[in-house]
Image (cartoon, grey):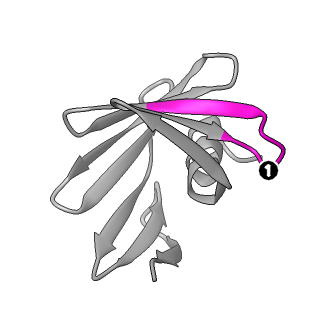
Amino acid sequence: MPRPCLALLLLALAAPAAAQSGGTTRFYDATGRYQGRAEERQGTTRHYDAMGRYQGRSETRDGTTRHYDSLGRYQGRTERRDGTAHRYDAQGRYQGRQERR
């Protein structure tokens, strides 16, 4: 079973709709139901589920984003370069990529 932070991150990457206002991005599913939000401040993004419960944070520096769960445990990283994001788990194993076109 995926950890909540990872699940929310994957939701954020795959969500069909997102609305941004200030430093907050709200996520909605394909039917328009609210799925959660992400609040960004100074390189740190805090993730919350649809009920407002804290799910974890992501910290970005120099093209690398480190992901942590709600208890502060390291969950993995995302490295962005040349328009492609490469995802690694907490043990450093490659998990896949996302490309922007």
Q: Furthest-left residue in view?
A: 62
Front residue of 8 and 87: 8
In this view of the protein, which residue sits in the foreground, 47 or 96? Answer: 47
Kindly identify the residue that appears in the image at 50 percent across and 76 percent down: 97
Apparent side of residue 69 relative to residue 50 in the rendered image (left or right): left
Part of the protein shown in magenta:
28-38
Which residue is located at x 48 percent, y 70 percent?
A: 93
> Residue 16's x, y, as percent?
68, 55
Check residue 90 for magenta coloring.
no
6 in relation to 72, above or below: below
Which quadrant holds residue 36? top right
Task: Classify 11 as above or below 71.
Answer: below
Say what amino acid the circle numbered 1 marks.
Ala
Callout 1 environment at 10 Å: few (<14), some (14 to 19), or many (20+)? few
Estimate the x, y position of residue 33 in percent, counting from the top left. 78, 34
Tell me what residue is drawn at x 32 percent, y 53 percent: 65
Horizontally, is 39 left or right of 89 in the view? left
18 left or right of 71 in image: right
Vertical placement of residue 68 versus 76, above or below: above
**Where does the image place residue 38, in percent across and percent down from the top left?**
47, 33
- The answer to whether residue 29 is magenta is yes
Which residue does the numbered mark 1 point to in the structure image? 30
Q: Quick check: can you spot residue 73?
A: no
Compared across the picture, whether 91 is left or right of 5 comes to: left
